[in-house]
Amino acid sequence: MQRELQQIVPGRATSDGAGVRIKRSLGQTPHARFDPFLMLDEFNSENADDYIAGFPSHPHRGFETVTYMLEGHMLHEDHLGNRGDLKTGDVQWMTAGRGIIHSEMPQQEQGAMRGFQLWLNLPAAEKMKPAAYRDIPAKDIPVVPLANGGQVKVIANSVTVDGKTITGPIHGLSTEPIYWDVHLPAQGVFEQAVPNDHNLFVYVYQGEVAIGDDQRKLSAGNAGLLFKGDAVKIAATNDETRFLVLAGKPIKEPIAQYGPFVMNTQDEIEQAIRDYRSGELVNY
């Protein structure tokens, strides 16, 4: 059964970090989540004033962050002594787990800075596991050509094209996430089987698409939450189109959130705040 468009979450201009200008779709409010996804931000500017201040040191606990750079250069540093350069096409998949303090700072003073940060929840059983992260260079992310002249970049999970299954670098996680970056020419169509039990949404960042048999439209800068189904069909309308397909297995647990801490209860949030203030966040 084809998935159809259920709800549109318009992206809203806001700022985060030390004043970085972003567009936020999922995560604007607690009601704008889509289990297991907590938030999706797009950053896109050629004006250095919009991004130069970056994201100075800040804590996280209880979830994962996925940073995908379309253009630009950011440096990640954390309390564990890790350093990671994210450049055009690279991805960082970070598990905050029980606690991490990190910064993400631009390494350029001019030019385009463009990409996304996704927040992906962790189940209660994994919220306090050790922090870790993985930097994935662009060369290690499969780019699969489509028959219509388009392509799909497989960051997480896999796609099947012409009977061949291509698996991306991220797989085997409990939420079984799918992360595809799809490029289509005008009138191009992307069709793929997906797990029926996953929540799936589409974020268009260039052009416009028509989703499912209903052909409901979704334009750039907006997230579209889809109904359940075992297949997804997305067509570009009149222009070249680019969009993310993001899906994951729902956790179905209560969420308590206070800024960069995402736990299951308010008591756990208060403990996270105490741990951060005392320096214990990173000493478990």
Image (cartoon, rainbow, N blue to C red):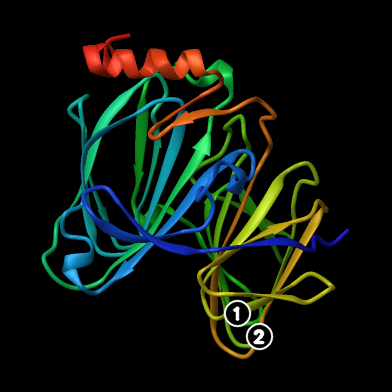
Q: Amino acid at mark 2?
A: Thr
Image coords of residue 88 (percent x, y): 30, 63
Q: Amino acid at mark 1?
A: Glu
The extreme bottom residue here reads 238
Taking the image as shown, residue 133 lies to the left or right of residue 194, namely left
The disc placed on residue 208 is 1
Taking the image as shown, residue 75 lies to the left or right of residue 31, namely left
What residue is shown with label 2? Answer: 237
For marks 2 and 1 on the same chain, the one whose residue lies earlier in the sequence:
1
Image coords of residue 86 (percent x, y): 27, 52
- The image quadrant where one finds the N terminus is bottom right
The disc placed on residue 217 is none
Image coords of residue 226 (percent x, y): 73, 57
Q: Relative to 253, does residue 234 appear above or below in the rendering?
A: below
User: Label 1: how many residues lie within 10 Å, few (<14), some (14-19) or many (20+)?
Assistant: many
69 or 23: nearer the viewer = 23
Taking the image as shown, residue 112 lies to the left or right of residue 161, namely left
Name which residue lies at 29% across and 71% down. Answer: 45
